Image (cartoon, rainbow, N blue to C red):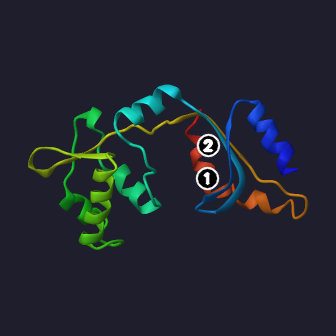
Amino acid sequence: MANSARNWLKRQGLMVKEEFYTPWGICDLVAAELDRKQVRKRLRLGQKHPIGPLIRLEILNAVPDAEEGQSTTLEELAHKYQDLLAATEVCAEIEKLITGKFVKVGEHGTLQKLNGWVPLHKRLVALELKLNRVDRPWAKPYPTRHLLKNRS
């Protein structure tokens, strides 16, 4: 069944990744149609590596976008995440985001995100392949239901 599903996705011109890790488990197949304009933008910004773990993504989402003209500081981020991480850990995550060119440092140490990744795709398809225990996949979409509500 996996071969048929993979071929079906590829025939639609999608890039396919098997056993894609999500916060809720492993998805059998994930396929994407990338937005070429966004891919070029990301490469122009020098963003050639993944952002990293979810906590780094969470911190990155808290950094204002450079295109909006707003900024934050390391101290503000450390305060925001003080219940989750030590200030040194927040600093280490920000350093990795700066190295990856996802965040730039402005005057007086202010931080702004360089958005070359959202949205990086035009279409995203996730397939959970089951021959038995077909009721199990229904448990996985519930944590992500909020992602679908904001798409219309």
Quadrant location of residue 123?
Answer: top right
Residue at image location 30% in from the left, 70% down from the top: 89
Q: Nearer the viewer, residue 60 or 20?
A: 20
Q: Is residue 74 above or below residue 148?
A: below
Q: Nearer the viewer, residue 85 or 27?
A: 27
- Which amino acid, mark 2? Leu
**Position of residue 77 in the picture relative to residue 31 (left or right):** left
Residue at mark 2? 148
Q: Position of residue 19 (x, y in %)?
A: 69, 57
Name the secondary structure under disc 1: helix
Real-space CA distance between mark 2 and mark 1, rounded to the nearest whole angstrom: 7 Å
Mark 1 and mark 2 in contact (Cβ < 8 Å)? yes
- Which amino acid, mark 1? Thr
Q: Nearer the viewer, residue 151 or 122?
A: 122
Residue at mark 1? 144
Q: Residues within 10 Å of mark 2 (few under 14, many from 20)?
A: few
**Residue furthest out toward the right:** 132
**Position of residue 145 in the picture relative to residue 133 (left or right):** left
Residue at image location 46% in from the left, 38% down from the top: 118
**Position of residue 7 in the picture relative to residue 105 (left or right):** right
Q: Position of residue 93 (x, y in %)?
A: 32, 62
Q: Quadrant of the C terminus?
A: top right
Q: Position of residue 103 (x, y in %)?
A: 29, 47
Q: Is residue 69 above or below residue 126?
A: above
Name the secondary structure under disc 2: helix
